[in-house]
Image: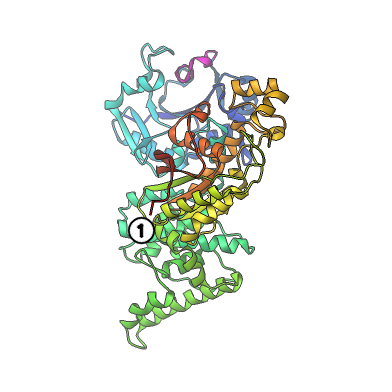
Amino acid sequence: MMKNGKIGALILAAGCSSRMGALKPLLRIGPATLLEMAVTLFRKAGIQDVHVVVGHRAEEIIPFLDRLKVKWVFNEHYDRGMLSSILAGVQSFDPHVEAFCLLPVDIPLVKPRTINELVSAYRNGQAKVIYPCFRKKRGHPPIISTICMRGELAWDHPGGLKSFLERFDEEAQDVEVRDEAILMNCNTPQDFRMLEDHYLRGDIPTIQECEALWERFDVCENVRAHSRVVAELARILAVYLNRVGLNLDLDLVVAAGFLHDLAKGQKDHAATGAKILKEMGYRRVGEIVALHMDLGSPKQFLDESDLIYLADKCVENDRLLSLEDRFQRPLARYVEGDEIRKAVMKRLEDGKAVRKRIEHLLGISFDRIIERYERGIRAASARGRREIYLVRHGAIRLPGRGKQYIGQLDLCLSEEGFGQAQNLAERLSHIQLAGIYCSDLARSVKTAEIIGKPHGLEPVKLSNFREIYLGEWEGLSFDEVCCKYPEEYEKRGRDVVHYRPPYGESFLDCSCRVISSFYEALQSTRGNILIVGHAGVNRIILCQAMGKSLESLFEIHQDYGCLNVIECKDFGFEVKTLNETVMRDPL
């Protein structure tokens, strides 16, 4: 089968965007709409024959396409599913188009080099369908030969597009790419925020992409563990320095930490690793990797490369050491005047100079930072799997009797609540924690402080982890609300997810802020983490972890001082422990 014909691109922009609540093709990330991003993607990859299928609110989308000089196709049956749009779009290609890339408009951040890799695989193989895969998960855009679309094919094909393409599985090929964006769509506002975050990274690989590069270049586990610790130490230093006015990019620091030894074992591995990364489009990471062995001339200001250099010099395998201890053995191997000893001494002195500048800016010793975060940094060397310890704060001192709507009232722990927090501290004292997060309400903060004390960790207080805000209902008893707001009380009973009390928020509103901060906590910390939340907050997180809808919220029980354990791997979740009440062992 000759494969030298034209390859086109088909962008699907006909859907109703019902879960998003806004017209997805015209949503903006940075200066461009998702639609413009998708079109630009293919043009940068050298594919000029780009067609867009429109349907829902087509009159708003078509003017954009006309300005972009892109051919559009109207699918009058857009409400019948994706396959109907594909059929409409394929018919618009001229006979010279041999295959097409298929991309829903809400997956716009795929890298042009990914398209190039897929096209190359299609042209050099016999497969009729090429799927991009990221760590063995299929994503978009597949390349589909037009041969697959010949013959009678109805929009209501049983099982839709997925079932249709399964007919060609024996003639399909999976192509592993280092591009997590092939899996990133935006069906919900939360998805969209994650898409925005990914866009803002620019040329910085995600943690998942860094780990995919480890796999691609056969980086051994010892080097991976070392790199995780270097990344976490450098990240903590960057956080401290940003608090005193620097503007260091945490994502860049972490990615460079993960990849600084990508070419370990090869000749001049710093330069070799940097060359690989720059060729793959990760220019800024490559520049830091090039300097992690020798910093070169001193710079006026500290930057990310200084932190990776110092962190690398303070980690031997996956163990934290002082600079002096780290260099003791290398220096002992060579006599005074030896050229290699001179080079080693220069590296030590460069490390000391960076350390001194950090200490001057922060006003605290480097060793103090290491001592404070040592357990969390060591936890970062753990392999793939991590655990989230999700706790509800201890019991509180209520201002009245009976069941009340507490919401965001800032109440203190009761004596019982202090006991529950202490029990949790004992239960979790042997767990290696990399970070502790809580809401900024007193009952959550105090619980987090008690649990964090044995670990030497201060909790990070986030207002987004506050309990749901109940507006005018806060502090009222259930009976009072039922009496004063009978209609509203009934409405909430019928739709607890979307209903907002007067001047309050709905559980959907609460979910948007909670889940956003939940993923931020996961992405900004390596290793196990503890979150001290509230009943509503915890239920929202557990619904996310268990794949339940928010309508199931109150099926999940959360007692005061309870513990939930969520296993996390590759941002997939499994709830291992649910609503465990921690009791002190009897004497």
Colour scheme employed for the rendering of this structure: rainbow
Q: Does the segment drawn in magenta span residue 304?
A: no
In this view, 531 is above or below 301: above
x, y percent for residue 32: 61, 38
Q: Nearer the viewer, residue 20 or 449?
A: 449
Q: Secondary structure at mark 1?
A: helix
Q: Which residues are magenta?
A: 76-88
Residue drawn at point x = 59 percent, y = 31 percent: 508
x, y percent for residue 351: 47, 74
Which image quadrant: the C terminus?
bottom left
Which image quadrant: the N terminus?
top left
The reply to whether residue 440 is visible in this rendering is no
Q: Is residue 545 left or right of residue 329?
A: right
x, y percent for residue 467: 60, 40
Report the amino acid beneath label 1: Ala
Q: Is residue 488 left or right of residue 16?
A: right
User: Label 1: which residue?
Assistant: 225
x, y percent for residue 483: 70, 24
